[in-house]
Amino acid sequence: MEKQVIQSVGFRNIEENGEITGFQLKIRLPYYRGVYLSQIRPGHLIVDGETFGEDEIMWRVNGEDYTYADMRRDCRNHWHPMEPATLIVKKPGGLKQGFHDLTYGFCCTHSYMPPFMEALEDPDKPAVIYFREFGQNTNSRRLLIV
């Protein structure tokens, strides 16, 4: 697995029944302990200036697909830090071949952090209070689709 949160491996268009229906990318959890899905606060994905929200993104964790709403309610399934999650994005026609600039943000709640500190965190903005072991909220990378 790469050090960057947004992984270069797995960035590609998705084809269903001979038609490109979207694209996918893989991300890793920067937090060393792992989290339950209900602890994840996903943000928006921005690709080349186009924003994708919760209605357009599915998370695949441990081989199962989850909407943002599913994740909010799921306190049984755990995302291990050594297993990347796949974000599946609906976009008819997918992305064109070439380089793309991606920014994705998410943060996680932690039982031992005071709620007022976590209330300050916005998954779409850099962390207000940065703890190296939690990672940064927003992550950017330029990747290639061939």
Image (cartoon, rainbow, N blue to C red):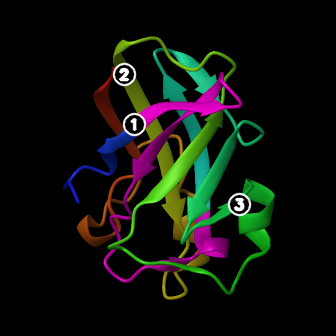
Is residue 119 in sight in this rendering?
Answer: no
In the depicted structure, whether residue 64 falls above or below residue 91: below
Q: Position of residue 134 (x, y in %)?
A: 35, 68
Q: Is residue 71 above or below residue 45?
A: below
Q: How many marks?
A: 3
Q: Which residue is mark 1?
A: 11
Task: Name the quadrant containing residue 70.
Answer: bottom right
Instruction: For label 1, count other residues whose C-alpha is less than 10 Å away and answer few (under 14), some (14-19) or many (20+).
Output: many
Q: Residue furthest front?
A: 18
Would you say residue 25 sits in the magenta stretch?
Answer: yes
Of pointers 2 and 1, the one earlier in the residue sequence = 1
Q: Which residues make up the magenta segment?
A: 11-40
Q: Is residue 73 left or right of residue 146?
A: right
Q: Is residue 122 left or right of residue 1?
A: right
Instruction: Name the quarter where the N terminus is drawn.
Output: bottom left
Who comes first in sequence, dot 3 or dot 1? 1
| Residue, far left | 3
**Is any part of residue 40 visible from this angle?**
yes
Q: Quadrant of the C terminus?
A: top left
**Mark 2 Cα within 10 Å, few/some/many (few <14, many 20+)?**
few
**CB within 8 Å, label 3 to label 1:** no
Tag in front: 2 or 1 = 1
The residue drawn where x is 73% and y is 55% is 68
Q: Residue at x 70, y 83 (%)?
A: 75
The main secondary structure of the magenta stretch is: strand
Label 3 belongs to which residue?
66
What amino acid is at disc 3? Tyr
Classify mark 3: helix, strand or loop: strand
- Mark 3 packing: few (<14 Cα in 10 Å), some, or many (20+)? some
Q: Is residue 122 above or below residue 34?
A: above
